[in-house]
Image: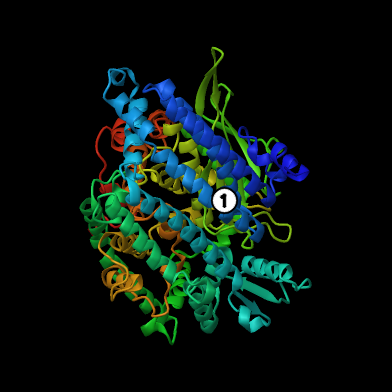
Amino acid sequence: MTESATIAKSHNPLLIGSGLPPFADIKPEHVVPAVNELIEQLDRNLAELESNVEATWTGLVEPLEKIGDRLYWTWGAVSHLMGVKNSNELREAYESVQPLVIQFSNKLSQSQPIYKAFKSIRNSNIWSNLEPAQQRIVDSAIRDAELSGVGLQGEAKERFNAIQMELAELSTKFSNHVLDATKAFSLKLTNQEEISGLPPSLLSLAAQNARSMGDENATVENGPWVITLDIPSYAPFLQHSTRRDLREKLYKAYLSRAASEELNNNPIIERILELRQELAQLLGYKNYAEVSLASKMAPNVQAVEKLLEELRSSSYNAAVNELEELKAFAASKGATEASDLKHWDISFWAERQREAKFNFTDEELRPYFPLPQVLDGLFGLVKRLFGVTVTPADGEAPVWQEDVRYFQIADDTGTPIAYFYLDPYSRPAEKRGGAWMDTCINRAKFIENGKTSTRLPVAYLICNQTPPIDGKPSLMTFDEVETLFHEFGHGLHHMLTKVDYTSAAGINNVEWDAVELPSQFMENWCYESQTLFGMAKHYETGETLPEHYYQKLLAAKNYMSGSGMLRQIHFSLVDLELHYSYRPGGTQTAKDVRNAIAKTTTVLTPLPEDEFLCAFGHIFAGGYAAGYYSYKWAEVLSADAFSAFEEAGLENEVALKDTGKRYRDTVLALGGSKHPMEVFKNFRGREPSTEPLLRHNGLATAA
């Protein structure tokens, strides 16, 4: 072995295996040696466990959790960096060892000795002595092994594993294509006429983009200005630019991302769908939607379709009326395009109509939502509802980028119970778009040498909001505020868990269509007066948001809500259909399926060049395949959960605290230790109803 290889082994920061990953020390060249060594070691651990396996909790589940923990510690850190610090070197390293990780995961989930041991726990007298959380972990392990092909033999098993491998490679490629295509396009504006209508915040960002792309003398006043397909740049341009031709150009670039030349995701989509169908059949299911629902809260495809149809029929006519109203508004302003509004006109005219109807703009509100102030409001809310205190712990944790913050959460006695990272700003060159919460460290309880210790959970919260520009703090749009609250809801689910077994702590083992409950629940509080006024303070004067703005925000809350609801139902039905009855390789393409569904789920037919599916990372590069409906399914739960607080009285601090405690002790504390319907009924005292969701969206009357 060479000297450098020895050094790599002994000093590799990706092999520490416990505590916080030392992000400042991790380099792409550490990935390959670390993963190689780790998998070798875990292979040995697994072989040893298989040969001495005991069908008991301590003889099976605890050693398995240790193996899972070690794998997640290393691979989780690498995957996290792929999302927030992407580079060609990291990609290459990731792609070269990803097959090893998948092979090992397959070996683990298809282990006959382990599967048999789980089954014998379930069939033995040990079963009745296990806690409900432990029983659910065992049940889930058996189900997951079956869904991972534990019952397959010979050629079928080999084929299953080959499919898993190819699917993982394809989803990484899909995601990289979207990132590269988003990065590859930019629109350079050089004269005043081209920036007509654009707000100062966008011009600041566009000048900053220009400087980072080599025009070091670019200024807000004189340009040049560069608009990108990154959401903080793209969305405001579509809302405000008076140049219809440029809006069209940008819109078409956005919806045709990753659909041509070497970044074309179309063949990848067809291949992914084909492989998923084959995988379903190997497992004895008719289609991939059935595989997906086998581990979800929804009992079957029909139940999902029934819910989506209930919501579609309540929102379709509302969306049609909204478009007609928008056309009439554009006509009243003398717009030549009024009778024939195109896709790139909708954001622009919707924003003008909203300004006219509610007499305020998104931009006017930005100065009242500087990030530090919004965080104060958010932390004030969780103290009020759940009795926990959030304090900055910057400097106590290694970070991957200088803007990343670190925080501690403590209970009412001041004892720390969890920590989280916050990576708030958009960095289109290296960070994927969107916002997400991920697990850094899971909660767990250990007993070593007779001493019990609890490992505290740590979360990653990632957003892509407007960065601080020209000496101003990050001034957030109200949408960005809602996104932060949403991700923090996921974070609370992970961090306030009381479950001591990693496999069911926090979001682990929570059915995918229930996992959005705590996140969507938090969004409701952005409109609650005490929370809003607690955080909406002008970044220069400290003045609280004037009351008239609050009333306008409330009035505007359900503006175009029929269209918003319909859009989510469109995505959900397309996803479901692609994984239920569509078969690749026939006369139809995935795009044809989408266009057919669009007839009853969109009010503006998608353009011929609309390649939305090529950037639909949720279902082709994330975990939402045949599960995008989960947002709506969980939103029914979250709206109903919030209505418990409304019934208690949002002004009644005592009742609010009581309800908050009940919510914390059920929805947030129980994690994956009970079925979500049981957890929900423990909190609400009954099964969920769709009424609160339709009411909150102003669609109850339409229904």
Q: Is residue 93 visible?
A: yes
SS for callout 1: helix
**Which residue does the image show at 31% across and 32% down from the upper left?**
139
At 29% from the left and 43% from the top, the residue drawn is: 297
Q: Which residue in the rendered view is the most extreme toward the top? A: 450
Number of other residues with Cα within 10 Å of mark 1, as a class: few under 14, some 14 to 19, many 20 or more = some
Q: How was the colour assigned to the protein in this rendering?
A: rainbow
Q: Nearer the viewer, residue 118 or 552?
A: 118
Q: Give the x, y percent position of residue 533.
A: 53, 46
Count all numbered tags in the image, as a single digit.
1
- Residue at x-position 69% and y-position 35%: 396
Task: Find residue 432 and report its image quarter.
Answer: bottom right
Amino acid type indicated by mark 1: Val
Which is nearer the eye, 52 or 506? Answer: 52
The residue wearing badge 1 is 97
**Quadrant where the C terminus lies?**
bottom left
Q: Nearer the viewer, residue 471 or 230?
A: 230
User: Up-down: is 630 above or below 609?
Assistant: above
Answer with left or right where residue 32 lies relative to residue 477: right
Q: Quadrant of the N terminus?
A: top right
**Relative to residue 538, is residue 88 depicted above or below?**
below
Q: Residue at x 28, y 21 (%)?
A: 124
Task: Say left or right for 82 vs 674.
Answer: right
Measured as percent of width and height from the top left, residue 92 is found at 61, 58
Position of 520 relative to 395 (above/below): below
Instruction: Give the image location of residue 637, x and y in percent.
Output: 32, 44
Does residue 484 appear anywhere in the picture? no
